[in-house]
Image (cartoon, grey):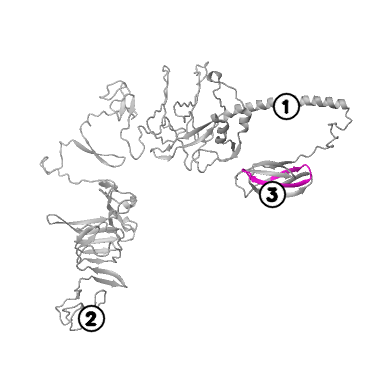
C-alpha cells in the first residue's frame, strides 16, 4: 500500500516509501509493512503545526510556548494548545486553552490564567470558557464562564448567559422558532459587580432580570415541606416560633419580609352596609379604631388634621406624590379632586390652598391640561377662575363686596417680579390700571413730549418663532417699537425681563433662563397726548400768525386796487387748473413680492428711480427717462430683496422725493 502524502506549511513534508520508517527527520506518513508504527504528524523543531484548506488556516497546534502574555498576565505556559479558527488578530493570535475555538476574536480582556484546562471560545469582542477552574488545595471545579469586552462601553450592558431549548423548526411553538424557547438567563449588572438570574422566556418579553432571582411569569411551587418528621427534630421546615413572614408587593411582584408582631393588633377599618370602608367617622370606640374625634395619618405617627399624608420615601427616578387622584370615568364631568369649604361662621374659607417652598422652582399651583390625538376639545384651559353670587339679596342669596375671578399677587424684592406672567396672546374684555391721584407722589408734567415721541421709530417685524419657539410669540406680521430705541428716549418705560428656567417634573432643566427687554406701551400714551398738546399749541400760534398776515395782505391789496397784477385770485397766476406737485406713492406698502411706484412729474425734465438700503447704499436704478409733466407708474418686483426697510428715490432734474418701503416675508 502506498504511503499517505500530506502537504502543509511550515512542515517540510517528506513522501514516505514502502520501506521508510521515519525514525529521524521531519516527515508525514507510515510504513505499511511496519504495522507497529503509528501515523505521525510531526515536527521535531519547536514550530507549530498548522492545517490549511483553500489557502486559509483552519487549525493550529502550538509548539512549546512558555513565558507568554495574555491580557496583561505574564509568564504563561501555552504549550501544546490546539486551536480551530483563523487566529488573525494580534490579541488572539495563538490558542490560549487546550482547545480554543476562534471566530475572528479581537479581544482577550475576558481571559484568565485558569482558562486553560478546557474549551475556550473567542468571537469578535466576546469570549466564553467551559472547563476546569483550579483553586488552592488541589480543588478543580467544572466552570462555565462568559466574558464581555469591558474596554468599550455598551449601552445595553454586558452580554448575557442564556439557556435556550430548540426543536424541529415546524409549527408555531416558541421552541420551533428561530430564537427558540428561552428557559432563563444570567444578566450582569452595569456595575459588573453582581449578576441577576431570571427564569422565563425573556426573549419574548423584551425585559431583563433585575433581581438576584427574577421569575418572569408563573409562580413558585413547593411540593414537600417535610412535615412527617416530628416538629423541631431538625429535619422538618415548619416552625411555630419564627417571627418573620414573606410578603409580596402586587405592584412589582417583589418579595419582602416583615415581622409578624403587631399584625393581629392592627386596626381594621370599618365596613359599612354598602361595603364602603370608613374610619374616624362616628363616636367610638369602634373596636379600638379611631372615632370622629381622631385624625388619620398616612406616613406620619402624629397627624394634625383629619387626613394627614406625608411622603417620606423619595423616588429617585420619578415624581414624589403625597396624594395622587386619577379618574377613569365616562360621566358628563370627571373631577379628580373636589374641594368644598362651606363653613359660614369662618373668617376665611379656602377650598384649596397650595404651598410650596425651598426648591429651585416653586409652584403654589401647577395646572396642566392637554388634548391627545385623536381627541378634540372645544376648550383647553389651564386655570379657570370663577367668582359669583348665588341668587339675589331679595331671594336670600349672598352678596360680595368684591368679586374676583383670579387674583395674582407677587411681593418679592427681586426686580424680576410679576403678578402675572403670560407667554402668548392675552385677551381681556376690559383693562384698568391703578391711576388714582392718592396713590401717586412726585407728580410732574410731561415735557418735550413731541421730541421724545419723534425719537421713536415704529417698525414692522416678525418675531423669531424658530429660535424662541417656546415663548408663545405670535407668528403674524407685527408693528411696534424696539425696546433699545425706546430706552434712548424713555428709559423708565423699558425694563429687563428674566424668564426663569423651565424644569420638568423630575427637576431636569428643559429650557435655560433667558433675559430680554420689554416695553410698557401704555406708558407711551401720556407722551402721545403731550405731543398732541404741543402740536396744538404750535398750530394755534401759526393760525394766529396766518390770520394776522391775511389781514395785512388784504389791507395792502385794497390800497392798490388790484390793478398792478399782484392779485392772488385764481386764474391770475396758475391758471384754471391746480398746479402739479412732484410726488411718489408706493402701493401696496409693506411689500411682499410686487408693488407699484406711482409718481407725478410737476415740470418736464429728466427723471430717475433708485432703490437704496436702510443705510443709504444704492442697490438698483429702476428707471431713467425724460418725462413731460404728468402722472406715471412703474411696476417694481422685490423678489430678489430680503425682508427689511428700503428707500425709493424719485429724482427730477436737481430735486428729489424719498419714500420708505418695507419688505416683508411671505
Give the percent coordinates (x, y) of residue 317: 34, 40
For label 3, the crowd category at 10 Å Cα-Cα, with few meaning under 14, some 14 to 19 and many 20 or more, is: some
**Do residues under tags 1 and 2 come within 8 Å of each other at their CB atoms?**
no
Q: Considering only order in the chain, which callout, 1 or 3, is on the residue closer to the N terminus?
A: 1
Q: Is residue 419 left or right of residue 571?
A: left
For label 2, the crowd category at 10 Å Cα-Cα, with few meaning under 14, some 14 to 19 and many 20 or more, is: some
Is 462 colored magenta in this rendering? no
User: In this view of the protein, which residue sits in the foreground, 101 or 80?
Assistant: 80
Position of the N terminus by quadrant: bottom left
For residue 542, which numbered disc appears in the image? Answer: 1
Residue interval drawn in magenta: 596-616
For the residues labelled 1 and 2, the Cα–Cα distance comes to 131 Å
Is 602 colored magenta in this rendering? yes
Q: Residue 360's image quarter? A: top left
Q: Is residue 345 left or right of residue 153?
A: right
> From the viewer's perspective, is residue 369 above or below residue 632?
above
Dominant SS type (magenta):
strand
Q: Which residue is mark 2?
A: 15
For residue 363, which numbered disc appears in the image? Answer: none
For the residues labelled 3 and 1, the Cα–Cα distance comes to 41 Å
For residue 622, which numbered disc appears in the image? Answer: 3
Give the percent coordinates (x, y) of residue 661: 65, 42
- Disc 1 is placed on an element classified as helix
> From the viewer's perspective, is residue 279 above or below residue 181?
above
Q: Is residue 608 left or right of residue 475?
A: right
Q: Residue 41's image quarter? A: bottom left
Q: Residue 540's image quarter? A: top right
Amino acid at each position: 500500500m502506498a504511503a499517505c502524502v500530506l502537504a502543509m506549511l511550515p512542515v517540510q513534508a517528506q513522501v514516505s516509501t514502502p520501506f521508510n520508517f521515519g525514525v529521524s527527520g521531519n516527515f508525514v506518513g507510515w510504513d505499511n509493512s511496519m504495522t507497529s508504527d503509528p501515523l505521525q504528524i510531526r515536527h521535531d523543531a519547536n514550530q507549530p503545526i498548522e492545517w490549511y484548506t483553500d489557502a486559509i488556516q483552519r487549525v493550529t497546534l502550538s509548539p512549546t510556548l512558555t513565558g507568554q502574555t495574555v491580557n496583561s498576565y505574564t509568564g504563561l505556559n501555552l504549550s501544546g494548545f490546539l486551536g480551530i479558527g483563523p487566529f488573525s488578530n494580534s490579541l488572539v493570535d495563538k490558542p490560549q486553552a487546550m482547545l480554543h475555538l476562534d471566530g475572528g476574536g479581537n479581544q482577550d480582556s475576558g481571559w484568565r490564567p485558569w482558562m486553560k484546562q478546557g474549551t475556550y471560545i473567542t468571537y469578535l469582542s466576546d469570549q466564553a470558557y467551559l472547563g476546569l477552574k483550579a483553586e488552592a488545595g488541589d480543588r478543580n471545579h467544572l466552570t462555565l464562564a462568559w466574558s464581555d469586552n469591558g474596554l468599550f462601553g455598551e449601552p445595553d450592558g454586558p452580554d448575557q448567559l442564556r439557556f435556550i431549548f430548540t426543536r424541529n423548526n415546524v409549527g408555531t411553538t416558541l421552541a420551533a422558532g428561530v430564537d427558540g424557547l428561552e428557559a432563563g438567563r444570567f444578566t450582569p449588572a452595569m456595575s459588573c459587580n453582581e449578576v441577576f438570574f431570571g427564569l422565563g422566556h425573556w426573549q419574548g418579553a423584551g425585559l431583563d432580570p433585575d433581581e438576584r432571582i427574577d421569575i418572569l411569569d408563573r409562580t413558585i411551587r413547593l411540593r414537600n415541606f417535610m412535615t412527617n418528621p416530628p416538629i423541631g427534630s431538625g429535619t422538618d421546615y415548619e416552625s411555630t416560633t419564627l417571627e418573620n413572614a414573606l410578603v409580596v408587593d402586587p405592584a412589582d411582584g417583589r418579595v419582602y419580609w416583615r415581622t409578624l408582631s403587631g399584625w393581629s393588633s392592627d386596626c381594621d377599618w370599618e365596613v359599612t352596609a354598602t361595603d364602603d370602608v370608613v374610619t374616624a367617622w362616628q363616636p367610638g370606640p369602634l373596636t379600638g379604631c379611631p372615632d370622629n374625634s381622631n385624625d388619620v395619618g398616612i406616613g406620619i405617627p402624629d397627624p394634625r388634621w383629619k387626613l394627614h399624608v406625608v411622603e417620606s420615601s423619595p423616588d429617585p427616578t420619578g415624581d414624589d406624590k403625597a396624594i395622587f387622584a386619577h379618574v377613569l370615568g365616562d360621566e358628563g364631568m370627571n373631577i379628580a379632586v373636589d374641594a368644598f369649604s362651606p363653613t359660614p361662621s369662618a373668617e376665611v374659607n379656602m377650598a384649596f390652598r397650595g404651598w410650596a417652598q425651598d426648591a429651585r422652582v416653586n409652584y403654589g399651583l401647577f395646572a396642566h391640561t392637554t388634548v391627545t390625538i385623536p381627541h378634540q376639545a372645544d376648550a383647553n384651559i389651564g386655570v379657570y377662575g370663577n367668582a359669583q353670587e348665588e341668587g339675589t339679596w331679595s331671594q336670600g342669596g349672598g352678596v360680595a363686596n368684591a368679586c374676583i375671578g383670579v387674583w395674582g399677587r407677587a411681593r418679592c424684592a427681586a426686580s424680576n417680579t410679576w403678578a402675572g406672567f403670560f407667554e402668548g396672546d392675552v385677551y381681556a374684555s376690559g383693562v384698568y390700571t391703578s391711576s388714582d391721584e392718592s396713590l401717586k407722589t412726585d407728580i410732574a408734567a410731561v415735557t418735550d413730549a413731541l421730541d421724545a415721541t419723534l425719537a421713536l421709530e415704529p417698525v414692522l417685524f416678525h418675531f423669531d418663532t424658530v429660535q424662541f419657539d417656546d415663548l408663545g410669540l405670535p407668528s403674524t406680521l407685527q408693528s411696534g417699537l424696539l425696546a433699545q430705541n425706546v430706552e434712548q428716549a424713555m428709559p423708565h418705560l423699558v425694563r429687563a425681563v428674566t424668564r426663569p428656567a423651565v424644569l420638568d417634573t423630575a427637576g431636569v432643566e428643559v429650557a435655560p433662563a433667558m433675559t430680554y427687554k420689554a416695553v410698557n406701551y401704555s406708558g407711551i400714551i401720556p407722551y402721545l397726548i403731550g405731543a398732541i398738546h404741543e402740536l396744538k399749541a404750535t398750530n394755534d400760534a401759526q393760525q394766529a400768525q396766518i390770520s394776522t398776515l391775511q389781514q395785512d395782505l388784504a389791507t395792502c391789496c385794497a390800497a392798490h386796487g388790484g390793478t398792478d397784477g399782484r392779485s392772488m385770485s385764481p386764474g391770475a397766476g396758475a391758471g384754471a387748473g391746480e398746479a402739479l406737485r412732484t410726488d411718489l406713492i408706493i402701493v401696496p406698502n409693506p411689500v411682499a413680492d410686487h408693488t407699484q411706484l406711482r409718481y407725478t412729474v410737476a415740470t418736464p425734465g429728466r427723471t430717475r428711480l433708485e432703490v437704496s438700503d436702510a443705510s443709504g447704499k444704492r442697490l438698483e436704478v429702476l428707471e431713467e427717462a425724460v418725462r413731460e409733466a404728468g402722472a406715471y407708474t412703474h411696476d417694481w418686483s422685490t423678489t430678489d430683496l430680503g425682508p427689511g426697510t428700503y428707500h425709493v428715490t424719485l429724482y427730477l432734474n436737481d430735486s428729489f422725493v424719498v419714500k420708505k418701503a418695507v419688505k416683508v416675508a411671505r
